[in-house]
Image (spheres, rainbow, N blue to C red):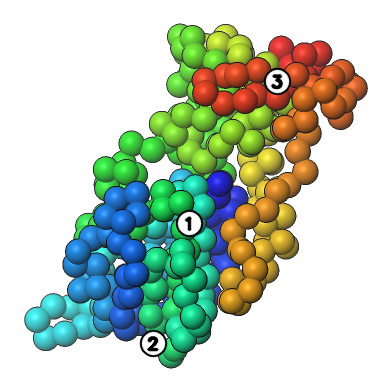
Amino acid sequence: MPELPEVETTRRGVRPHLVGREIEDVVVREPRLRWPLPRDLRGRLAGATVRDVERRAKYLLFRLERPASPQRGAGDAGTLIVHLGMSGSLRVLSASTMPGPHDHVDLVLAGGDCLRLRDPRRFGCMLFASGDPHRHPLLRELGPEPLSRDFDGAHLAAVARGRTAPVKAFLMDSAVVVGVGNIYANESLWRAGIHPRRAAGRVGAARYDSLARAVKETLARAIEKGGTTLRDFHSADGEPGYFRMELSTYDRPGAPCPRCCAAIKVARVGQRSSFYCPRCQR
Ligand SMILES: [Zn+2]
C-alpha cells in the first residue's frame, strides 16, 4: 500500500513533468474507483494548466489555473485531488503507450505525454475541488503533517492528555498526525522505546519528544530511500510507487532486536499487527 513516503516520492517524480503543462483531454476507461469519478471531470480539467503538484497527508493535489480571458481573469481553476488507495500508481508516459487492464484514467498533456493512473484494486480516488482544497471534507479534519514544524512532542503530549487508547492506535489516527501508517508507527515506537500498547495518556512529555523525532527521522529516511529507488516516473516499464526500507522490527517476529537482541514479539493493536521488543519498549 502506498504510504506517505511513496506518495511524496510520486509527487517529486511526476511534478517536473507536469508543472506548466496544459491538460488537453481526459480519458476515462473505468470511472468506478473508491468513489465514482466526477461526471464533469473532463470539462473541469481540459484546457487548464498545472500550476503545482502538492501533497496533503496521502492526497496529491494538482493545482490548476487557466489563462486570462475577457470574461474572467487568470487564476485558480480548482484542484484535482488524487489518492492512490491500496494499489494505485501514477506515471508520465507517451499518450500513445498502450494502456494495461488497470490503467483507468489518463490526463493527456499538451506535447504528447499523459499522466496515467493505474489502480488494480480501485480503492484510490480522483476528485475535484473548485475552492480551497484544504476545506474539502476529506482534508479539513486532518492533523498536522509529520514533517512540519506543527508536529512535535508537545503536540502529541497535548492531544494525548487523558486518552486511554494504545499509543500505536493514537499515532496512526490521522486527526492526531497524518501519514503514519502501520509500518512507520512500528518503527517509530521501537526507536523511541515505547510499547505499542501503552495508553497514549500515560506517555510522558520527554518520551513524546523522542517519538516525534523518531517519526520524522523514519519518514525522512524512507522518502530519501524512495528518491533513490524510484528514479523513473517517466517510463513504461516497471512499477513505480512501492519500495520497502530496512525496518528494525516490522514483520520479524522471533528475530533479535537490533538494539538488545531480545526476540521480537508480535501483538494485535487495534486491527493491526504490532511488532515490538519486549525488553526495550515499555
Ligand atoms: Zn530491544
- Give the alpha-carbon distance from disc 3 to disc 2, as whole Å: 51 Å
In this rendering, the answer to whether 168 lies above or below 60 is: above
- Disc 2 residue type (three-letter): Ala
Say left or right for 73 vs 102: left
In this rendering, the answer to whether 81 lies above or below 34 is: below
Between marks 2 and 1 in the image, the one whose residue lies nearer the viewer: 1
Q: Position of residue 233 (x, y in %)?
A: 59, 71
Which of pointers 1 and 3 lies earlier in the amino acid sequence? 1
Say left or right for 183 vs 154: right
Asked if residue 1 shows in the view, the reply is yes
Q: Could you say whether the residue bearing mark 3 is in a helix, strand or loop?
A: strand
- Disc 1 residue type (three-letter): Pro
- Disc 3 residue type (three-letter): Val
Q: Quadrant of residue 52?
A: bottom left
Q: Could you say whether the residue bearing mark 2 is in a helix, strand or loop?
A: loop
Q: Residue 266, labelled with which disc? A: 3
Q: Which residue is mark 1?
A: 120
Q: Are marks 2 and 1 in contact (CB under 8 Å)?
A: no
- Give the alpha-carbon distance from disc 1 to disc 3, as whole Å: 30 Å
Q: Position of residue 85 (x, y in %)?
A: 45, 49
Q: Nearer the viewer, residue 213 or 48?
A: 48
Q: Nearer the viewer, residue 121 or 70?
A: 121
